Amino acid sequence: MTIFGLFALLISGLASPFIFAPSFAIGWFARRWWHLPLGALVLTILDQAEIMLIEMPDAQPDWGLMPLGIIPPLCWCAAGFAMRAWSRRERQRRSNQTIRALPIIAGMILGALSVAASALGVGLLYLHTDQLDFHAFGLGRSADPWAPYEAIFFEYLFPGLLLGQLTGGLIGRVLGRPILPPPAGQLSDNIALSA
């Protein structure tokens, strides 16, 4: 397998909603750091079992690529774990006063553009490597020459746009709250230490 094939395999794992959603949830609800590799390993085993069931009866595991299969779930588990820690820290640091609208709108626009662009890139990568038939629903039944591009639009670009808008809006909502001033005792301690 070439480097481009390995890169396509890694991107395929990172872009799969069947890997992304459960891995992110495992990372979000994990209490300790060692739950992340354990959850990623379990998810990798389940994903490989699903692939073998789809390709039956002649399915043979590719043992040389098995270590690469744990990288995408581990990345998404770590992202969920880091996002929960960041969210907790920001909730403690920010007040419950009114939320400013500009960070929410900016987050929605930037999130929508960045995630839609990356989803479009993944869809075009699948088209370039002839894997779009496997990753798109019902594409093999169409004889229309524009069907692959329509599948990329409706199955990658449009959901990526919506997911990015939602995620960017939520991050903007957290960042749109004013920061709490430090407690008075902590402020006097910092002044005393700097003198």
Image (tube, grey):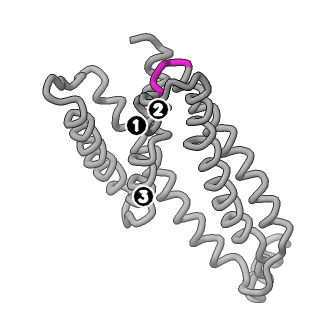
User: Which of the marked residues, 1 or 3, is nearer the chain's N terminus?
Assistant: 3
Read off the residue under disc 1: 71
Residue drawn 28% across and 29% down? 66
Question: Which numbered marker is on residue 139?
Answer: 2
Q: Nearer the viewer, mark 3 or mark 2?
A: 2
The 10 Å Cα crowd at callout 2, few under 14, some 14 to 19, many 20 or more, is some
Q: CA distance from mark 2 to mark 1?
A: 28 Å
Quarter of the image containing the N terminus? Answer: top left
Q: In the image, is residue 17 above or below residue 173?
A: above
Tell me which segment is drawn in magenta: 128-132
Q: Give the secondary structure at mark 2.
A: loop
Residue lying furthest left? 57
User: Which of the marked residues, 2 or 1, is nearer the chain's N terminus?
Assistant: 1
Quarter of the image containing the C terminus? Answer: bottom right
Q: In the image, is residue 136 above or below residue 181?
A: above
State yes or no: residue 129 in magenta.
yes
Nearer to us in this view, 143 or 125: 143
Read off the residue under disc 3: 27
Residue drawn 59% across and 64% down? 86
The 10 Å Cα crowd at callout 3, few under 14, some 14 to 19, many 20 or more, is many
The 10 Å Cα crowd at callout 1, few under 14, some 14 to 19, many 20 or more, is some
User: Which of the marked residues, 3 or 2, is nearer the chain's N terminus?
Assistant: 3
Tell me: 166 left or right of 69.
right
Tell me: 134 left or right of 86.
left
Q: Label 1 near label 2: C-beta < 8 Å?
A: no
